[in-house]
Amino acid sequence: MSGFLLIVIMLLLPGICGVTAVIAGASGESRLTSSTSRSPIHRATDTVVNRATVSEVTPDQIAKAIQKQLKGEWGRKVKTVRVTVLEPVDPVMIPGGAVELHIMPSPMEEGLGRRVFQVEVTTNEKPRKAIPVVVDIAAMIDAVVATRFLKADEVIDKGDLKTVEMRVHQMNHPFITDRDEVIGKSASRPLPPNMPLRSAFVKLPEVVKKGDRVLIEARRGGLSIRAYGVTKSNGQLGQTVMVSNLDSGRELRAKVIAPNLVEVEF
């Protein structure tokens, strides 16, 4: 069998792995050289990488922590506290597991607007990092406003009022937030609708007017003397007004006790 035919037969035989080459020797005889190619053996090994746990502290987490603390400090002075973190703008990476944030405001700063805090980050009760934080703080209140135009000296009823949410720029704001402070009082000046009310905008109603006919009562111990008179000015409950006695014409200083009733001391 010729060398060429042997090569063809060997290549076509099934079940033969690798390549069999026929090499002709110097004497013209042919000898077979078999070279079997083997795929390299790959062994799967588990590689254990010891990496420390890293937690992320985001600006949103910082804002919520500061907001919670301020709401606890300010109590019922405001309705809502809004905190916007200006710095840092990116998350801060902290080594360790679950983090806790502790807010440490500067003792020299308080109130609203731009403020600086130190935020201490702890993991497993161990301090990890202190983050300097710059924030803008805004506060919202429910301000009492009139629902309609109120004339000066007009007595204010419950239906004349409502509350609207508004931003304040200082904690000691002058606006009224409790409608009970206004109901039953009168406007000290004309009040347009939707204007946030201040304490100076309302007053106790005047229960007597200048020229009203009133009952003058004088008491001492068990003795009571009554007479009629005419007021010389307007007066609120508890105020002192001048009253002219209709019988004697004498003018007296009297305290307004109720509508159409004043009291004098003697």
Image (cartoon, rainbow, N blue to C red):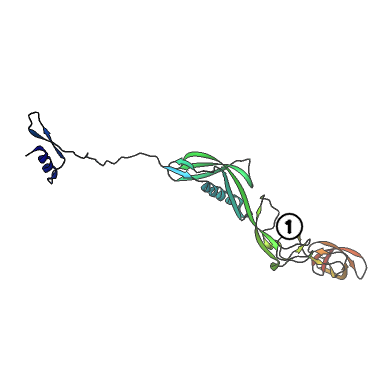
Is residue 221 visible from the viewing direction of this image? no
Numbered-mark total: 1
Q: Is residue 140 visible?
A: yes
> Which residue reaches farthest top?
26
Residue 135 in the image: x percent, y percent? Answer: 59, 45
Quarter of the picture holding the N terminus: top left
Q: Residues within 10 Å of mark 1 (few under 14, many from 20)?
A: few
Q: Position of residue 157 (x, y in %)?
A: 71, 67
Residue 176 coordinates in the image, percent (x, y) = 69, 58
Please give left or right for residue 265 compared with residue 171 in the image: right
Residue 196 x, y percent position in the rendering? 70, 58
Q: Is residue 203 left or right of residue 83?
A: right
Q: Residue at the location (45% across, 44% down)?
A: 55
Tell me where residue 34 sits by quadrant.
Answer: top left
Quadrant (top left/top right/bottom left/bottom right) for the C terminus: bottom right
Q: Quadrant of residue 2?
A: top left
In front of the other: 180 or 31: 31
The residue at the point 81 percent across, 61 percent down is 239
Return the residue nearer the eye: 42 or 57: 42
- Which three-letter amino acid code belongs to the residue tagged 1? Ser
Please identify the quarter of the rendering in which residue 207 is found.
Answer: bottom right
Front-most of 28 and 242? 28
- Residue 147 vs residue 96: left or right? right
Decide if residue 33 is on the left or right side of residue 266. Answer: left
In the picture of the structure, the residue carrying the numbered disc 1 is 199
Q: Is residue 101 above or below residue 156?
A: above
- Quick one: 51 or 33, which is closer to the camera? 33
